[in-house]
Image (cartoon, grey):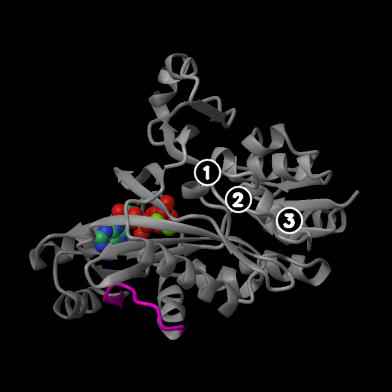
Amino acid sequence: GATIGILGGGQLGRMLSVAASRLGFKTCVFEPGGDCPASHVANDHMQASYDDADALRKFANSVDVITYEFENIPASALDQLEALRDVRPNRRALTVSQDRMSEKAFLEDIGLTVAPFMAVDTLDDMHKAVAAVGTPSILKTRTLGYDGKGQARLSAPSDAEGAFAAMDGASAVLEGFVDFSCEISVIGARSADGQVACFDPGENVHRDGILHTTTVPASVSASLRTDAVLMTGRILNALDYVGVLGVELFVTPAGLIVNEIAPRVHNSGHWTQNGCVIDQFEQHIRAVAGWPLGDGSRHADVVMENLIGADMDTIPARSADPAVALHLYGKADAKAGRKMGHINRISPKS
Ligand code: ATP
Ligand code: MG
Ligand code: MG
């Protein structure tokens, strides 16, 4: 059978490998780290750096198609991989979402709304941005941020210099703080022949910058849910996207504002594992393999809760709850702030 190459060996790569395996594919994971969550379940693990041209060539030659679980793949590695195999989702989806500035420009280009923003490279830029965007606001590194890392909040203009210093010289973007009533996200998929399917929007609650829970159904009107799904379809089509994409949105009285997009399976889509017949991981593998998408309609209400660090201690108690499905990533070291697993608590569809 065919082999799917996965760049990145974290929990997303692990769950993609499981889904691929269930569909009869083999998987090979490329990951610089050694004992990674995906290496325990993939057929093959290539442990090498993204600078290692020989390893990249060997990896590409050993698989039929390449996908990824994270968006920060170095451009030079992509050049080498793309020359040998299809990389899905495509390069444009990656480059657009690697940099918050290009991502916002793309979203505005296709008619979607983002928070007011301005690029910040120098302290002078910072003062101009604070004058234009105002406070409260959030300064974020343009690249490489996740789980709220690389961000500094400003409550008053006097916070400008401290926030700028916190970026440690990295290019940044100042964003106006959105006074949202809630956060939702849509997990959408697009197949190689352009079929689009979206899962029900989920409602997200963050804690210390990290996703804490996703609840479906989201407590928003049917028309907002439809808006969110249509926006996701617009993004997928504009990027000629193949695979699963996550779209994070702020709900405001003036409508939906896009926070960010992720060109991959997404933490806020983990509820689909127990709320749908076809979950986000299978949907992604189907798309990447050139298969038709599955039916992702929801058959249960679900609350997904991330297990971060010491939350793992609650596992014995939680696993006794018959409504709870456990998903653990096999990570040895339950460090503070580390995603160790998640649970899906299901109830009858409301
Ligand atoms: P992820 O792990 O989702 O990639 P990230 O590090 O890219 O996280 P963001 O999604 O930009 O971070 O921000 C994390 C959270 O901080 C958001 O989900 C939201 O709760 C809050 N936040 C970010 N930007 C804004 C904003 N402009 N206005 C209000 N809240 C915001
Ligand atoms: Mg992000
Ligand atoms: Mg986010």
Which residue position holds label 2? 280
Task: Give 83 or 278, whichever is nearer the viewer.
Answer: 278
Q: What residue would you read off at disc 1? A: 270
User: Which quarter holds ligand 2?
Assistant: bottom left
Crowdedness of circle 3 by 10 Å Cα count: few (<14), some, many (20+)? many
Residue type highlighted by circle 3: Arg
Q: Are marks 2 and 1 in contact (CB under 8 Å)?
A: yes
Determine the CA span between mark 2 and mark 1: 7 Å
Q: Report if the CB atoms under discs 3 and 2 are less than 8 Å apart.
A: no
The mark nearer the N terminus, 3 or 2, is: 2
Instruction: Quickly name the residue at label 3.
Output: 286
Residue 63 in the image: x percent, y percent? 84, 54
Q: Is residue 310 left or right of residue 125?
A: right
What type is the residue that disc 1 sits on?
A: His
Q: Which region of the structure is painted magenta? A: 110-119
Instruction: Residue at 64% x, 41% y: name it.
Output: 15
